[in-house]
Amino acid sequence: MSDLKVGEPIGVLRHGWFAGVDDYAIAGGWTGGGEALVVADAAGGLCAFDARNGKEAWAKPQSHEGGILSLDLRPGHSEVATAGQDGRVVVRRVDDGEELCALDVGEGWIDNVAWSPDGKWLAASCSKRVSVFGSDGREVWRSDDQPSTISALAWSGAGELAAACYGRVAFFGAAAGELRQEFTWQGSLVSMALSPDGEYVVCGSQDNSVHFWRRSTGQDSRMGGYPAKPSALAFDPTGEYLATGGGDTAIVWNFSGDGPEGTSPGYLELHDQLITTLAWACRGRCLATGARDDTVAIWSIQRDGQGKGIGGAILDDIVSSLCWRPDGRALAALDAQGGVTAWRVGNK
Amino acid sequence: MESTQPVPVTILTGFLGSGKTTLLNRILSEEHGKRIAVIENEFGEVGIDQALVIDADEEIFEMSNGCICCTVRGDLIRVLGNLMKRRDKFDYVLVETTGLADPGPVAQTFFMDEEIGEEFSLDGIVTLVDAAHIDQQLGRSDESTEQVAFADVLVLNKTDLVEPQKIDLLEARLREMNRMARVVRCEMGDVPVETVLNLSAFDLDQALERRPTFLEPEYPFEWTGVYALEPGRYGLSLAEGPDPAMSLVVASNQGVDDAALRDGAEWCVRRYAEPAVPLAPGDAIPFAQHVNLELDSSGRKSFTLEVEAADRVGLYTQHTAEEFELQLIDDNGAVVEPEAERTWVAQHEHDDEVGSISIERDGDVDPEKLNAWLGELLREKGVDIFRMKGFISLAGESDRFVFQGVHMIFDSQPDRPWGAEPRTNQLVFIGRNLDEQGMREGFEACLI
C-alpha cells in the first residue's frame, strides 16, 4: 500500500464524506441504526452528522467547559453521554442534540463514561471513584477510592462493571456496586478490554506490556516486548482475536482454545509511528488501525492472526479514533485537526 | 504530518513557602504574550490568573520490575496526554510540584513515556530554596536534598531575610551538592524570567551551545569587597595571614547587586587565568591585572591603589579579608568600609551525602571500555546518581560525543566536530554517597 495519497482512499475504502469539528476530535460513535455519527472535540464541543452525506445535524459548542474527555452512545436508544473536564456528564438526544440530563459527578475531570450493554446503567469515573447512575439520572452507587485515578471502565455483560487503574482491576456488581472480584498487579493499567464471553480481562500497562487475567481461575499472564505502552486494545466480536497497539506494529493475539500463551501473534506492519486506535468491524475478521503518522489501514485477519492489508487512507493529522458503523459498511476516522472522514467500505 | 516542535516544560520544585507561586505569577505576568498551561499539585499560596491552570493529585507509578528509573508520574501523563490534544492552544507548560515531591519520577516521565516524550520536551528543573530555612531542611528531608540535586537552576529566594555572609555559606553548600546548577539569588521570587525558562537543559543538541562547560565555575578567589571611592591614593593594608602571598584582581566600575558581582566574578576568573605579577609591599596595584601580593615579611604591609576618577572598585582576593585583616585606608588614614561584600569560599564543613563529582581529563577514550565502565556504574549506582552530563572524546571519532542522564536513563549523541580544538573529556555526576576516587580511577582506565 505504498501508493497511499492524502485524501485518496484505496482498496476497500471508498469515498464517503468529509466534515469537521472545531478542535482535536477526541471520540465519536454511531447510533445503533447507523443514521448519525456523533463526534466530541477537545474544546468541549459536540456535533452530530448525517450518516448519508456528512451534513451537520446539530452542534453544541461549549458542551463541557474545558473540554470533553469521553463519549458513549446508549445502546438501544438514540442518546449520547459525554463526560468532561467540568465534572459533569451530559446526556443528549442524538436526533436534535437536546440535553436530557446533566449529572454532577464530582470535582475534577470525568475521564470515562460507559453505558451498560442493555442501556440501563451509566457508569462514570472521576479521579479515584466510579459512580453508576440509573436511566433516570439518579446515582445508584459510588465506589470507595481506588488506589489511583481510574484509567478505564468496561462492562462485562449487563451485570458487572470493571474499573482499571494503577495497581488493580476491580469488578463491581452493576446494581449495588459490591466488589465481586479484583486482580492486582504493580503497574499502571492504561487501557482495558474484556472478551465478549467475559472470561478474559486484558489491560495495557505503562511498562510496555499487556497483562491479562482469566476470571474463572484468576490465572494471569503478561506479554512484554512492546516498544510503547499499549493504549489501544480490542477484541474481535467472536473473542478469538485481540488486537493491540503499543508500537508502530499492531499485534494480534489468538485467544481461542487455551489462550495466547506460547503462541506467536500476528504482526501488522504498515504504520511508521505509534498506533493510536484499533477497531474491529462487526464481522469478517476485519480490523482497522490508525496511527500518529496520519495513516489508516484496513486488515483482513487470517486464522493464524497474520493480516493482509486490504485498504488504507491518509488523513491530514494524527488519527485519534476509528469508528465502524454498526453494519460494518462504513468507517469513520477522526483526526487531531478535527477532521471527520467517513468512507464506505466494500468492493463496489 | 505533524512537524511541530515539542512544547517545552519547566518543573518548579521547592518546599512549601519557598516562593514557587510567587515566581510562577511573575513568569506569567512577564510572559503575557505566551500561552502558558500550569499544572499544580498543591494549592498555591496566592491565586494564579492569566493561565490555564489544572490541579492534579500527585500519583507515583512504580513498575513491577522495581526499577526506580521506570517510576513515573501518572498524574502528569494523564494531564499532559490531554493537553497535547490542545497543543495549539499554548506554548509552554509549567509544572509546580509539592514541596515533598521527588523530582526523579517527574523528570523520568518525559523519557519513559513515548507519547509524552514526542509531544513535550523537559526544558529544565528549577528549584526554589528558602534561604532562611533550607539549612535545616537539607539535614532533615531527602526530598529537599534531591530537589537541590536535580536542579538546573537553584533560585535562592528570600535573601533579604538572611545575613549576606550566611547566604554566601549557603550558596557554597548548595554548589558543593550540585555543581551543574546555576545559582540565582533573589528576594520575593524576583528573578529574570530568562534565567528559569528556555534552558534546554536536557537537550543534547543545545547542550554546550551557550556555555563551553557543564560546570558552574569554581572561583579561584574567596572574597570580594566593593568600595565606593573618590579620586585619590589609598592604601591596601594586610596583616600576617596563613599564606606568604595572596593573589588579587582589582576591578573598576563594579556593581553591587548579585548579577553585577557574578559578572565581575566571571570576568575575574579570566584575569586569574593569566600569570600573576608579583608585587612587593609599597608597590602600586594595577587595575584589571592578576597580581600576587608578597606578604612574607612580618607586621602589617601596605600596597597603594591610585584612583583617578570616582569609581566603584571591586577587590577579588584569593583569601577572605578576615584572614589577613585586610583594610582599605584613605589619604587621611581612615578605614574605608566596603559598600558590599561577597564570600565565594567553597565549604566542606557540611559533609552532605549528596554531592557533585566532576572528572576533567585530556585525551581519547576507548569506546568499549567506556561502555563497560558506564554500564556497570549505572547498574550499580544508578539509583544514587540523580543527574549526569558530560562530553567525551572517543578514539577514532571526529565528533565530540555528548551525554546526559537521569538515574539509569542515559542519552547520548555525537556533537560538533572537534576540529582544531584540543580533545578533552568532562563528566559531571550528582549523586548520593558516590565513590569519587573509584569513579576517577574507573574513568582513568578508559583513557587510551
Image (cartoon, coloured by chain):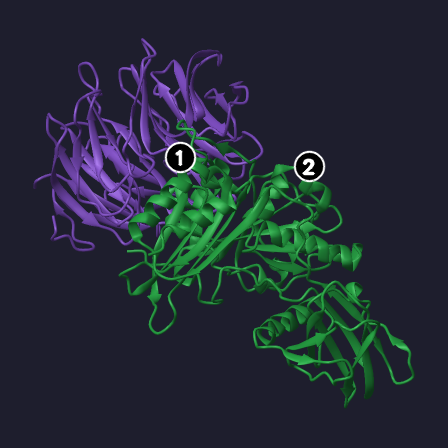
Chain colours: A purple, B green
Q: Which residue is mark 2?
A: B140
Name which residue lies at 72% across and 58% down: B168
Residue situated furthest front in the rendering: B297
Q: Give the number of callouts.
A: 2
Q: On the picture, is A68 further left or further right than B170? A: left
Pointers 1 and 2 in contact (CB under 8 A)?
A: no
Asked if residue B297 is positioned above or below residue A212 in the image, the reply reads below
Q: Quadrant of residue B264?
A: bottom right
Q: On the picture, is B246 further left or further right than A139? A: right
Asked if residue B39 is positioned above or below residue B162 in the image, the reply reads above
Name which residue lies at 67% across and 53% down: B347
Q: In terms of depth relative to the viewer, which is nearer, A326 or B56?
A: B56
Residue situated furthest left in the rendering: A348
Residue A104 screen position, x and y as percent: 55, 31
Residue type at the position of mark 2? Arg
Asked if residue A117 is positioned above or below residue A311 in the image, the reply reads above
Regarding residue B98, the answer to whether it shows in the image is no
Query: What secondary structure is marked by label 1?
Result: strand
Read off the chain for label 2.
B
Q: Which residue is mark 1?
A: A71
Q: Residues within 10 Å of mark 1 (few under 14, many from 20)?
A: many
Query: What secondary structure is marked by label 2?
Result: helix
Q: On the picture, is A278 further left or further right than A309? A: right
Q: In terms of depth relative to the viewer, which is nearer, B423 or A93?
A: B423
Do discs 1 and 2 belong to a common subunit? no
Read off the chain for label 1.
A
Regarding residue B170, the answer to whether it shows in the image is yes
